[in-house]
Amino acid sequence: MSAAQIPAIFQPHFNADLYDEVTRPPEQMSNEEIVEFHAQVLRGRKLEFVIAGCETGVELANLLSERLGLPSNGTALSAARRDKARLADALGAAGVRSIRQVVYTAALPGSSLNLCCSRRTQTR
């Protein structure tokens, strides 16, 4: 897990019994400490790849796979894999067409989440 506690929004859907092992970092670790904690747990195991279990695990999976020398998406565009507006920018920079993004940066009341909305445009 990428945090000691499962975020409340995911708790109703998480069933630890579905997994052979659940590794939780101690409370109050920095992001770098969490990555190193998991890297230490995984070192020496016969792994082929690291897969994110959900959207919030993408950056951790990228960091771990890169650190462990496994096939990886790498970390250079990790933020773009999580932030769909950045993803659209990265696609555009690579010459790949995608939908335009409208980003609303004010947080929702009672939430730390920001909104990113997509809007289709006509292609020519």
Image: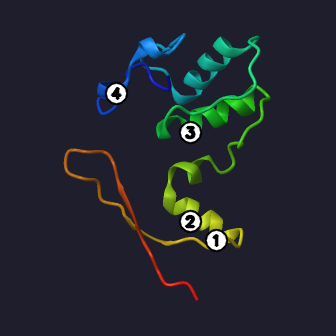
- The mark found on residue 58 in the picture is 3
Q: Which residue is mark 1?
A: 92
Task: Report how far apart the C-alphas of labels 2 and 4 lie in the structure.
Answer: 30 Å
Q: Earlier in the sequence, mark 4 or mark 1?
A: 4
User: On screen, 33 above or below 106?
Assistant: above
Q: Residue furthest left?
A: 109
- Tell me the element at label 4: helix
Q: Amino acid at mark 1?
A: Gly
Is the image coloured rainbow, by chain, by secondary structure, or in one colour?
rainbow
Tag 2 residue: 88
| Sequence-earlier tag: 3 or 2 | 3
Q: Which image quadrant is residue 9 in?
A: top left
88 up-or-down from 100: above or below: above
Q: Nearer the viewer, mark 4 or mark 3?
A: 4
**Comes first in the chain, label 4 or label 3:** 4
Indicate the amino acid at tag 3.
Answer: Val
CA distance separating discs 3 and 2: 17 Å
Label 3 secondary element: helix
**Label whose residue precedes the other's in the sequence (1 or 3):** 3
Marks 4 and 2: in contact by CB < 8 Å?
A: no
Toward which corner of the image does residue 97 lie, by quadrant? bottom right
| C-alpha distance separating marks 4 and 1 | 35 Å
Kind of residue indicated by mark 2: Ala
Q: Are marks 4 and 3 in contact (CB under 8 Å)?
A: no
| Mark 1 surroundings within 10 Å by alpha-carbon count, few (fewer than 14), some (14 through 19), many (20 or more) | some
Q: Quadrant of the C terminus?
A: bottom right
- Looking at the image, which residue is at 52% across and 31% down? 53
The residue that appears at 53% across and 29% down in the rendered structure is 31
